[in-house]
């Protein structure tokens, strides 16, 4: 499975959108400052995910969200996701499943 994810900086409130097969590992990578584009802009927290069968599908969705260029659109998406997790509406996203994995650090130590 592949995941589209949205991170939010706890320091600045800014969002970062990406895609990966392993969300907990990717979050640890970003928080360890290995990513040049996000270096010293965290700490980051996972605020949203969507699950896809192929990397291609996840990349299409990633490009769509990045094309919005409007923070309000991302906040609207996050707000709808929160309502869904609280039992109001359908639930196409799997953030609750991924949060369970985040309690264990899976980031490889050799990097």
Image (cartoon, helix red, strand yellow):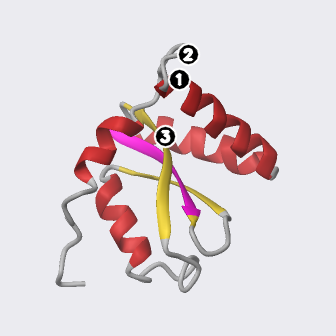
- Residue 3 shown in magenta: yes
Q: Earlier in the sequence, mark 2 or mark 3?
A: 3
Q: Nearer the viewer, residue 57 or 89?
A: 89
- Residue 95 screen position, x and y as percent: 41, 39
Q: Residues within 10 Å of mark 2 (few under 14, many from 20)?
A: few
Q: Which residue is mark 2?
A: 88
**SS assignment at label 3:** helix
Q: Is 31 placed left or right of 100 in the picture?
A: right
Mark 2–mark 3 Cα distance, whole angstroms, equals 25 Å
Residue 62 against residue 102 in the figure, above or below: above
* Magenta portion: prevailing SS class: strand
Region of the chain picked out in magenta, as a range: 1-8
Residue at the spot x=21%, y=66% of the render?
A: 105
- Residue 104 screen position, x and y as percent: 19, 60
Q: Is 78 placed left or right of 93 in the picture?
A: right
Mark 3–mark 1 Cα distance, whole angstroms, equals 21 Å
Q: Which mark is residue 84?
A: 1
Q: Residues within 10 Å of mark 1 (few under 14, many from 20)?
A: some
- Residue 85 screen position, x and y as percent: 47, 27
Of the residues tagged 2 and 3, which is closer to the observer? 2
**SS assignment at label 1:** helix
**SS assignment at label 2:** loop
Q: Are marks 1 and 2 in contact (CB under 8 Å)?
A: yes
Residue at the spot x=49%, y=40% of the render?
A: 58
Q: Which residue is mark 3?
A: 58
């Amino acid at each position: 499975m592949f995941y589209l994810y949205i991170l939010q900086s706890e320091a600045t409130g800014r969002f970062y959108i990406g895609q990966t097969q392993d969300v907990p590992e990717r979050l640890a990578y970003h928080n360890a400052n290995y990513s040049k584009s996000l270096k010293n802009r965290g700490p980051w927290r996972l605020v949203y995910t969507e699950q896809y069968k192929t990397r291609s599908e996840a990349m299409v969705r990633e490009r769509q969200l990045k094309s919005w260029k409007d923070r309000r659109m991302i906040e609207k998406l996050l707000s709808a996701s929160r309502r869904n997790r609280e039992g109001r509406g359908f639930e196409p996203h799997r953030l609750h499943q991924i949060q369970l994995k985040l309690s264990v650090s899976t980031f490889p130590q050799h990097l």
